Image (spheres, rainbow, N blue to C red):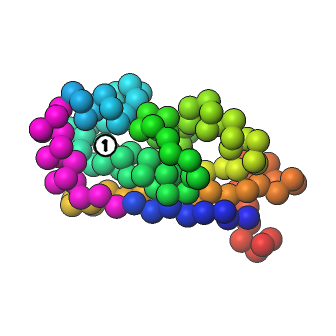
């Protein structure tokens, strides 16, 4: 059952502007070392950084308590982006049988993220896709 949906969109110019004004502080405050390794390896890291920023904001719109910028991060399972969580959030998600689904996108001017927070049914394994026809 879907519990919440969070959506965030951000202008790439805004990210570039903040990054130029506060290069180290912006990166260290908002992103994990693994996120920075991934993004900074890109020719232009701005869209990847912005998409991860949007993912953290989108998750916050679903989550009932505030969290730090580095307590939620984007990692990859193969080519698919997924959210990673600090221990306190991961424990709360597991306790409440919740899973967070993530979709990222970007264009020349914007980056966006959608997070869907789902409560798993007892019979549904967390990594198995659900069929629309079974709903």
Point out the image quarter for the N terminus.
bottom right
Crowding at mark 1 (Cα within 10 Å: few <14, some 14-19, many 20+): many
Residue hosting label 1? 49
Residue sitting at 78 percent across and 72 percent down?
135
Residue sitting at 62 percent across and 57 percent down?
117
Q: Is residue 54 left or right of residue 85?
A: left
Q: Picture quarter containing residue 123?
A: bottom right
Residue at the far right: name it: 123
Is 75 above or below relative to 106? above
Residue 101 image position (x, y, % from top left): 58, 53
Residue sitting at 38 percent across and 25 percent down?
33
Is 45 above or below relative to 110? above
Residue 68 image position (x, y, % from top left): 45, 37
Q: Is residue 100 visible?
A: yes
Inspect the magenta stretch and tell me whether residue 77 lies in it: no
Q: Is residue 46 left or right of residue 98?
A: left
Is 84 above or below relative to 131? above
- Image mark count: 1
Characterize the magenta stretch by its predominant secondary structure. helix
Q: Which residues are magenta?
A: 9-23
Judge by depth and name the residue closer to the eye, 86 or 39.
86
Residue 86 image position (x, y, % from top left): 56, 32
Residue 96 image position (x, y, % from top left): 75, 47
Judge by depth and name the residue closer to the eye, 45 or 66.
66
């Amino acid at each position: 059952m879907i519990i919440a949906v969070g959506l965030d969109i951000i202008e790439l110019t805004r990210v570039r502007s903040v990054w130029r004004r506060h290069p180290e502080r912006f990166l260290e405050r908002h992103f994990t070392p693994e996120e920075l390794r991934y993004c900074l390896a890109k020719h232009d890291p701005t869209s990847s950084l912005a998409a991860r920023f949007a993912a953290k904001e989108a998750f916050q719109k679903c989550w009932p308590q505030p969290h730090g910028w580095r307590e939620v991060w984007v990692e990859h399972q193969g080519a698919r982006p997924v959210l990673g969580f600090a221990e306190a959030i991961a424990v709360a998600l597991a306790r409440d049988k919740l899973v967070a689904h993530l979709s990222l996108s970007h264009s020349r001017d914007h980056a966006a993220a959608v997070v869907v927070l789902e409560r798993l049914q007892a019979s549904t394994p967390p990594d198995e896709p659900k069929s629309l026809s079974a709903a």
